[in-house]
Image (cartoon, grey):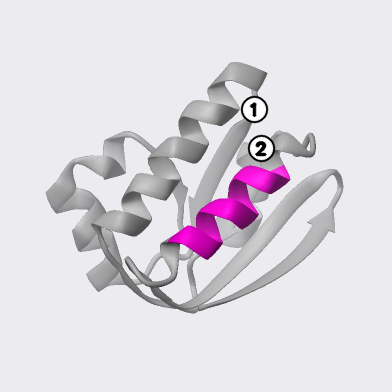
Amino acid sequence: MDIQEKTDDGILVLSISGRLDSATSPVFEENLLGKIKAGNTRLVLDFGPLEYISSAGLRVLLKATRELKTTGGIMVICSVRDYIQEVFDLSGFSSVFTMTGTLEDAQAAC
């Protein structure tokens, strides 16, 4: 897993590549929650380069969403590949998270 980050107009964009699974989710959780605790309340997760997500990765996303709700923040997930979208749909998480097709749409939703 690799995380690229940039800030655009006050929105923190994290581009996640590789696999988000039980081996990599602790690092991702530490990074993501650290960004939220540092005061980032508008986040976009670009999943375009993401190849795989497991339930451990979904758990981190859920935890981050809960943390953001306490600060009045928002997290938008974008550019999800079809087979990863299936994971969100089958788990029922596609209705839990704000998801858009493009990075531009995600930034507009923030």
**In what element is the residue under mark 1?**
loop
Q: Residue furthest left?
A: 90
Q: Is residue 23 left or right of residue 95?
A: right
Relative depth, front residue between 77 and 102: 77
Instruction: Give how far across and how far down residue 13 sits, in percent.
Output: 69, 57
Q: Could you tell me if residue 83 is visible in this image?
A: yes
Depth check, front residue: 46 or 22: 22
Residue 110: assigned label: 2
Q: Residue at x 56, y 56 (%)?
A: 45
Which residue is drawn at the image coordinates 61% and 68% (left, top)? 15
Q: Indicate yes or no whether the magenta region holds residue 31.
A: yes
For residue 87, above or below residue 41: below
How crowded pointer 2 is (Cα within 10 Å; few <14, some 14-19, many 20+) is rated as some
Q: Is residue 62 magenta?
A: no
C-alpha gap between disc 1 and disc 2: 9 Å
- Determine the residue positioned at 28% across, 61% down: 85
Upstream in sequence: badge 1 or badge 2: 1
Taking the view exactly as shown, the residue that stands out farthest to the right is 9
The answer to whether residue 105 shows anywhere in this view is: no
Q: Amino acid at mark 2?
A: Cys
Give the main secondary structure of the magenta stretch. Answer: helix
Q: Quadrant of residue 67?
A: top right
Vertical side of 8 occupied by 6: above or below = below
- Looking at the rendered structure, the kind of residue marked 1 is Gly
Considering only vertical position in the picture, is 14 above or below 107?
below
User: What stretch of residues is rendered in magenta?
Assistant: 26-35
- Quarter assignment of residue 5: bottom right
Q: Nearer the viewer, mark 1 or mark 2?
A: 1
Classify mark 1: residues with Cα within 10 Å, few (<14), some (14-19) or many (20+): some
Q: Is residue 35 left or right of residue 68?
A: right
The residue that mark 1 highlights is: 73
